[in-house]
Image: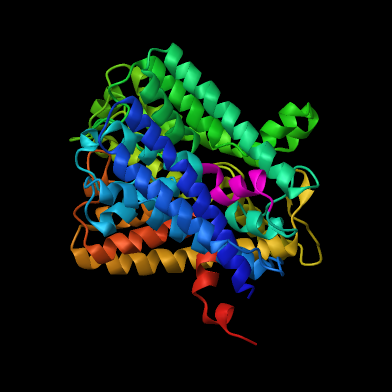
Amino acid sequence: MNHKMVVYVLGRVTQIIGILMLLPAVVGLIYREKEIVPITITALIVLLAGGLLNLKKPKKTQIRAKEGFVITALVWIVMSIVGAIPFVVTGYIPSITDAVFETASGFTTTGASILTDVEALPHSLLFWRSFTHWIGGMGILVFMLAFVTSSADEMNIMRAESPGPSVEKMVPKVRETAFILYAIYTVLTCALVMALIIAGMPVFDSLCLSFGTAGTGGFGIKGDSIAGYSKACQIIITVGMVLFGVNFNVYYLIIMKKFRDLFHAEEVICYLVIYAVATLIVSIGTFNVVIGSMGWTGAEGFDSFGEALQQSAFQVASVMTTTGFATTDFNLWSNISKTILVAVMFIGACAGSTGGGMKVSRWILYFKQVRRELQSYIHPSSVRSIWLDGKVVGKDTLRTTNVYLMAYVFVFLISLVIISFDGYDVVTSFTAVTATINNIGPGLSVVGPAGNFAGFSILSKWVFIFDMIAGRLELFPVLIMLSLSTWRKK
């Protein structure tokens, strides 16, 4: 283990967080808020601490796969703790556990919250809270690789932080790939901000909600999330959530005018089909005519099918891309609608997007592996390769995909057992773990769109923090970091 390089990269990232933390101080200055003093002091201390960690660059700058995973896990833990300091020092979230929960939820783009009155926060903290989504959406280490030269082995870091069963470079150099990703990310975010402003949303609201949409995070700045904004704004955010759930490689292909390659984007096609079908089913399940004819007592819906379609399109996009915004309390919808929403929670968005969940590509590979096994029973002598996006999927990728599923189930079940001691109903406990490990935000029942995670015990909140970080990094970096063999000297 190259310990000095691990510390050096941690220092670099801490410096970046310190610099970015000055932005909410600028917002506080604009709105003449007293919180700018503690926030600015915190940012300078964090910047200084980061500088002390990387005063001297290590002679050996090699970052192997093991170091890449450990660096990634440690960075996300450190920045969740460091990013929580503004909430604590300003007194708006005095509990360290709650502050770290809120910050980890922000950076991991989960959107789960312990706040009961979000509108009580000053503009500076609302900005920082939403900005953590944007930082975490593409990844802080990808940001570092794009703008800060580190070592010749950046791919091991990028592979550890980027979501999906496999990570490929768009161009030969990793730094150029990271820069292209952030360029696309920034341009799409700016376009979303402008669209919301044109639709009549205030500039500050447009910035904060665009950060949440781009990072597929879901922190709102109003108590009713997105419900209080116009239908036009809701539709723009719906489109934004769907677009940021697409693999960014597709946008690169469009920029490079490689339109023929788009027909091989199997994952994106499946993603859009699943989204369309889920939206249609949920729309039917929230149409009052259907609810009345089926005798679904207690379920709330919409009198107009057009409104049911619009609200369902928003909520399915929010849940499937793991954004977590809400325009209504879907906890009151029919069972079929809630069942579909829970199902797409597990499916998630595309690999290579800012969305969470298990990723559409993994489900495609699981389906194709099952189909191949069934075919092998029918035709024992046949040899079939598995293809995805026009390429043969290697054995290593398939093995990693299968191991990921097993690790996911183990972490999910252990988390569920631990938080069950809090005494909540099964739906609350199950969807709370689902919402955090898949980086979604809201679940059902107590943790539904109208609820929050404030009532859980300290132990449960730390379990959720672990789940959010592990889920965002897709388990392996955190599990490798916790492995004793990782740190054992040979």
Which residue is located at x 38 percent, y 67 percent?
413
Quadrant location of the C terminus in the rendered image? bottom right
Magenta region includes residue 144: yes
Quadrant location of the N terminus in the rendered image? bottom right
Asked if residue 101 is positioned above or below residue 187 in the image, the reply reads: below
Q: Nearer the viewer, residue 244 or 48?
A: 48
- Image coordinates for residue 394, horizontal then vertical, percent: 75, 60
Q: Nearer the viewer, residue 473 or 8?
A: 8
Q: Nearer the viewer, residue 154 or 27?
A: 27
Asked if residue 177 is positioned above or below residue 419 in the image, the reply reads: above
- Image coordinates for residue 266, horizontal then vertical, percent: 68, 40
Q: Residue furthest bottom?
A: 490
Q: Would you say 233 lies left or right of 166 here? A: left
Q: Is residue 276 visible?
A: no
Its colouring scheme is rainbow
Q: Is residue 236 visible?
A: yes
Magenta region includes residue 284: no
Q: Would you say 266 lies left or right of 429 here? A: right
Report how many numbered discs are placed on residues in the image. Answer: 0
- The part of the chain drawn in magenta is 137-149
Q: Quadrant of residue 109?
A: top left
Which residue is located at x 72 percent, y 28 percent?
254
- Image coordinates for residue 206, horizontal then vertical, percent: 41, 23
SS majority, magenta: helix
Q: Nearer the viewer, residue 21 or 237?
A: 21
- Image coordinates for residue 383, horizontal then vertical, percent: 81, 62
Q: Quadrant of residue 279?
A: top left
Which residue is located at x 45 percent, y 33 percent?
211
